[in-house]
Amino acid sequence: MRKIAILILLSFTILMQACEDVIEIALKESEPRLVVTASIFLPKDNPEASQFIRLTTTAPYFSEDVPAASDAEVAIIDERGRKYDFQEFEPGFYKSDEFTPRFNEDYQLEILYKGELFTATESLVSSPSIEFVEQRDGAGFSGDNIELRAFYSDPEGVKNFYLFRFLHESLSIQIYDDEFTDGNLTFAYFSSSDVKKGDLVRIEIQGISRRFYEYMFILRSQTGSGGGGPFQTQPTTVRGNVVNQTNPENFAFGYFRLSETDTFNYTVQ
Amino acid sequence: MKKVLFVLFFSSIFIIDLCAQERYTLNGLVKDMASNETLNGVNLLFPDLNTGTTSNEYGFYSIRLPLGDHRMVVSYLGYKDLSLEISITRNTTRNFDLSEISEILDEIVISENTETLNIKSPEMSVNKLDISTIQKMPVIFGEVDVLKSLLLLPGVSNAGEGSSGFNVRGGAVDQNLILLDEATIYNSSHLFGLFSVFNPDAIKNLKLYKGGIPAKYGGRVSSVLEIYQKDGNSKKTEANGGIGLISSRLLVQGPIVKESGSYLIGGRSSYAHLFLKLTDNENSAFFYDLNTKLSYRINEKNSLLFSGYFGRDVFNINESFINIYGNSVFNLRWNHVLTEKIFTNLSLIYSDYYYGLTLDFVGFNWNSGIRNLNFKYDFNHYLNENISFDYGLQSTYYQFNPGEIEPNTPQSGINPRELTKKYALESAVYFSAEHNILPGFSAEYGVRYSGFLRLGQNELNLYPNDNPVNFNETFQIYEEAEPIGTRKLSRNKVERAFSNLEPRLSLAYSFNDNQSVKASYNRMSQYLHLITNTSSPTPLDVWAPSGKYIEPQLLDQVAVGYFQNFRDRRYSMEIESFYKVIQNRLDFIDGANLIANNSIEQVLLTGNARAYGLELLFRKSKGKLTGWLAYTLSKTEQQTPGRTSAETGIVNGNWYNTNYDKPHDVSITASYELNQKWQVSTNFAYQTGLPTTFPQGQYLFENLTVPVFSPRNSNRLPDYHRLDISATYIPKPSSSKYKSSWNFGIYNIYNRKNAVSLSFRKNQDTGFNEAVRLSLFGIIPSVTYNFKI
């Protein structure tokens, strides 16, 4: 009988060996494309903040960093035709101190890069405030996580979409819709085993459009955080809202969006 | 020429009936001597008359014989042949009891399988496995698994270790009709695909139709897996069971009314979670299932069978993730011998698949599922020794629950919500004939007429131009269309009706007793669709009925084959080739969210699937060494073109490999009887690596490292192969009271790290991208103890 018990235990340790290992693999390389990160923020407490746009290109998958896309002409044009130029201050980083987005207005992003014109049109999306944060200890699957719930009130009767950024040691990005929480006081959820008492967690809510929500939804499912395996979703090319007007085949990756944001700095109890 | 054939064909039906005056019917049941269990597929042969028949699913046979005394042989492999002289002077009912070879103690035990080839019958593309063969094969964790065993036969594969369900001849998992005692099983896997839901002890036999599917079956386009549970021993009470590493089983059966009434109750449960409890871990993951059966033979002509199955998987991770799902099935059948030539079975079946989920960190309880009530009336009509008919009707009422959501605590921000329930009625009538047209030439032909009524529901979205999916030409992507309104229709009204005529034909020509060629064609329709866009289905996936926006799947399949027995039927060879095309296969737009989606039509696109291949099975079914070599060469693809020339479709409208496409699939299974106490078995499997998609580049967007992927499924995982061995030890083979056996096994003996997936991700510590291979099962030893009292 004891033998059986040993065998059973032995098999269980082996069962747990279901393992992951890093392997070498040769990959094909695709032609480089422009990547646009044009996320314009309107913080509730600092509406005059500088705005940044980052341009890069795609890189081979195993390369350590992505090349900057320099020497582009970058501007945002409002409905009245006023043009806000973004100046490159570091390779690939473009900045404007002039531009402050307003609600109910369409903005056009224009990028002239290597002789091709890329455009995108969006408007500003509002966001509620983070009202309070609840903490629960001993949470998570392993029972040693600290979890935070950041509460906000969803406006009733309209479809809303949110992006949350929880910044502790690393950045955790989450997206929410209000399909099942319309008009309620509801929460975004953050759980980590690295968080300790006295740590500061910076929580940011951003109002986002439905299309950007869907874009992020696909993007997140493609980044490998899903872990692969039999339940992974189908890999695909994720198209954003930036269109190449000169040569539509040579489309750009990335997104142009404008979001109102609110932040809450929470000290872990 | 056509006319001649036509006349020949019909005359062969009628001429034989004309001279039937001096003929009488012999009918009855074939049963196991020890348990009274009815036996299915027993050959009843009359060598001098050169005729014979086979018992049906309920052990019934019927044959027309001329007046006189005839030599008769009743044979069923694994059982001792019964030879007798029978005198036919009038219509006669005669039951036969066969004794199992292993029950005969003094004889040399020769393992034989019921799986020898039926050369002359038009039946083709069928995989049969005897439960005793399955029990000998080496299996992972020593858990005997009927579905995993099927994977070693040609034409059957799955989407890798740990994936649920199985794929038949390039069909998808949801295209298999799985019948347990005639009731539909919607999810055949426990623990996300690690084990199948069928308790091997409770199973009498199983049969998988890959092609040439008889008209009796319909509703799924790829295959039919028919599993019958044991009836229960009506002679004496017995118990058997097993203790394994993952689960234990116990099955008790016995008479209620001696000789005519019996019960069977069996249970199985995994207990890994108990060990977790010991280690102070609050998490648990386990499954259990219960099988029950009550049989009562009222008289020679009537019997009642009640059977039930209930199975659940339970996951509880620190009370923040609680997941319970499973099938339940109840079924009442009435076997009635209408006349000496007509056997009927009336079934009333209830079948239910439930999925429940509590996510505390989101704050909700969720449940979804599918229920159906099914009525079937099937007739076997044995007209004469050359023709028998199967006909009947079936009707199924479905209720689909795509999901109900409620807050799990008062603080939860979730609004209670019920996704619109859907209702449908699927009905069919069928007629099919098995016909010996000329000596050596036989056919099975028939037709099934199926209809599907999608019934009214509370809220049905309406879209501009009835088009729920838009193509955005600027961004070159598909988008959900905005509904312009909804329609409410009573459940008693028909929203949309479909009907399909499904012809079926199988032909066999035998050159002699040992060689034949066969061909078949079948058309089938499927009105239900499993909504899933992951590599392998998950228990959470919901079934959607065809309706206003979803068309039924339609299949056309042709298959041809060559069959041969060698050396006194010790060896057999089967070569088959098939080609099939499926219309209206669903695909999903990029980023489709399928979970809790109340208007699934907004993310669906329709395409085609096709598969073709060559299957080879070489088998040795008698002697000390038994086993087979199976090889499948096949291709399985899917295509979703754009609906107009401006649209891209999926993967630019090109054909792409399905997730389970394996061009080469080889398996070798062998079992050798060393002596009465020891038996050793081995499996070897080699398969081309599964399709996958590698990145060709990367970019950075808002702190996310995003891969740029190559076209879908255009790359492959490394090839898969493994070798398993097992040994069965019977301590006291001649004991008649308490029988026991030990099964020792080693799965994946050379510990190959077969990749289940390759994922590409950023290493959180180094910040660099890497390729990560996930392999599930390395070398796994196991031991199982089985007993029978």
Image (spheres, coloured by chain):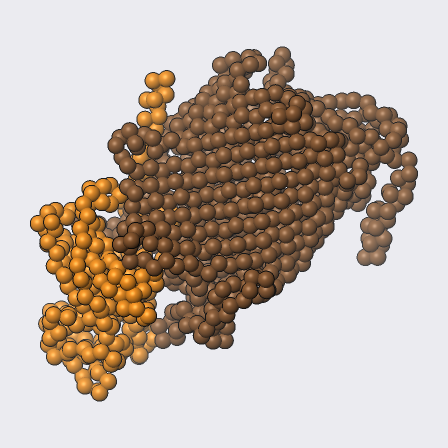
The single residue placed furthest to the bottom in the displayed view is A80
Using the rendered view, name the quadrant where residue A212 is placed.
Answer: bottom left
Give the drawing colour for chain B. brown
Residue drawn at x 13%, y 76% as measured from the top left: A96
Q: Position of residue B479 (x, y in %)?
A: 39, 69
Nearest the viewer among B405 and A162 is: B405
Residue drawn at x 63%, y 58% as measured from the top left: B451
Residue drawn at x 85%, y 53% as measured from the top left: B7
Give the drawing colour for chain A. orange
Residue drawn at x 12%, y 47% as measured from the top left: A196
Q: Is residue A266 left or right of residue B298?
A: left
Looking at the image, residue B413 lies above or below residue A258: above
The single residue placed furthest to the left in the displayed view is A198
Q: Position of residue A265 (x, y in %)?
A: 12, 59
Looking at the image, residue B704 lies above or below residue B671: below
Looking at the image, residue B384 lies above or below residue B650: above
Nearest the viewer among B424 and B785 is: B424
Nearest the viewer among A125 and B82 is: A125
Q: Position of residue B26 (x, y in %)?
A: 81, 32
